[in-house]
Image (cartoon, helix red, strand yellow):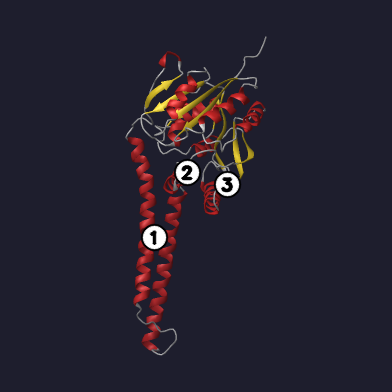
Amino acid sequence: MTNLIKTISILIPTYKSEKNIPVLVEKLENILSKSNYHYEILFVDDCSPDNSLEILRAISSETDTIRVISLSRNFGQQIAITAGLTYVKGDAVITMDDDLQDPPELIPEFLEKWEEGYDVVYAIRKSRTENIFKRLGYSMFYRILSFVSQGKVPVDSGDFGLVDKKIVCILNKMTERDRFLRGMRAWIGFRQIGVEFERDSRYKGKSAYNFWKIIKLSLDGIISTSNMPLKFSTTVGFAVSTMAFIGAIITLIQKIITYYYPDSFLSVYPGFSTIVLSILFLGGVQLISIGLLGEYIARVYNDVKGRPLFLIKEIIGFENNELHYD
């Protein structure tokens, strides 16, 4: 009795990457064709404004291993990956970026770890090619995220990695809208292992992730994986209240000393700056706490509306046009 050949799915969200796609497909085909697996390469076009979709359409017409999902509008990378996860058919799924910063050459090592029994294999970036401010920002973010997250997201790990089919099924059952997939992946558990790699520069084009998108992803990561910010604001509130209480006692003592010993160095004198700074400090703490609470409430509001996570405009390379919206 022979073992059935397993199928591997490569899932790639794409946006503004028309110059990278042909090179990426060529590299993937060269690597996967030498493996002992059936495979599919699924691109999710996140309503890219360039010719990415037309290039994918042309490539898909030449081979039966390339499939394409085109979303109705730009939903963002995390939702694009989510859309792809509902359509992949592999026994294992490898998610990667479309800009060749995630090296296809790492795929055999992912598969080797998977065959050893690991359910999740994630890539760990040993180094980055961005400027020093971005590198410092990413480094701080991942360490803060790892500290506060309930699932302990691995430091310097991204979406590049492999997940077993059962992990895909679990992810598809997790319906939150503000998604941070690497945090969700860590929260699930099972057997996980990291593989280190050197992250290259983007092959062609400019990254669609600007400063504000990075900030949003960071907020989604921290808020979706932990309620520690709420606890932190509560702790700060208690700390400020304690300091105010102690300050009130000290002020009362100073007033008594001033009444009996006007010339004492402990005497209290009215100070405009002290009052203003105290008001600004307390106001800042209150606004930050309200803002954190608002972020959590906004995510609850988004979830209870019950809208679809994504909408698909077109599918390419599928049998029987198996389009669905669940």
- As rendered, which of 265 and 59 lies closer to the eye? 59
All told, the count of numbered labels is 3
Tell which circle, 1 or 2, labels the residue nearer the N-terminal end: 2
Query: What residue is pinned by disc 1?
Result: 285
Q: Amino acid at mark 2?
A: Gly
Query: What residue is pinned by disc 3?
Result: 129
Question: Given this view, does label 3 or label 1 mark the residue nearer the observer?
Answer: 3
Task: Locate the N terminus by quadrant.
Answer: top right
Q: Amino acid at mark 1?
A: Val
Q: Residues within 10 Å of mark 3 (few under 14, many from 20)?
A: few
Query: What residue is pinned by disc 2?
Result: 221
Task: Locate the C terminus by quadrant.
Answer: top left
- Residue sitting farthest toward the left: 305
Q: Amino acid at mark 3?
A: Thr
How far from the left and from the top, in percent, is residue 108? Answer: 65, 29
Q: Residues within 10 Å of mark 2 (few under 14, many from 20)?
A: many
- As rendered, which of 76 and 20 lies closer to the eye? 20
Quadrant of the image occupied by residue 16: top left
Can you say whether 263 is above or below 178 in the image? below
Question: Given this view, does label 1 or label 2 mark the residue nearer the observer?
Answer: 2
Mark 3: secondary structure: loop
Distance, label 3 to label 1, CA atoms, is 37 Å
How far from the left and from the top, in percent, is residue 34? Answer: 65, 22
Distance, label 1 to label 2, CA atoms, is 22 Å
Quadrant of the image occupied by residue 287: bottom left
How far from the left and from the top, in percent, is residue 310? Answer: 38, 30
Distance, label 3 to label 2, CA atoms, is 22 Å
How far from the left and from the top, in percent, is residue 316? Answer: 44, 20
Answer left or right for 203 relative to 297: right
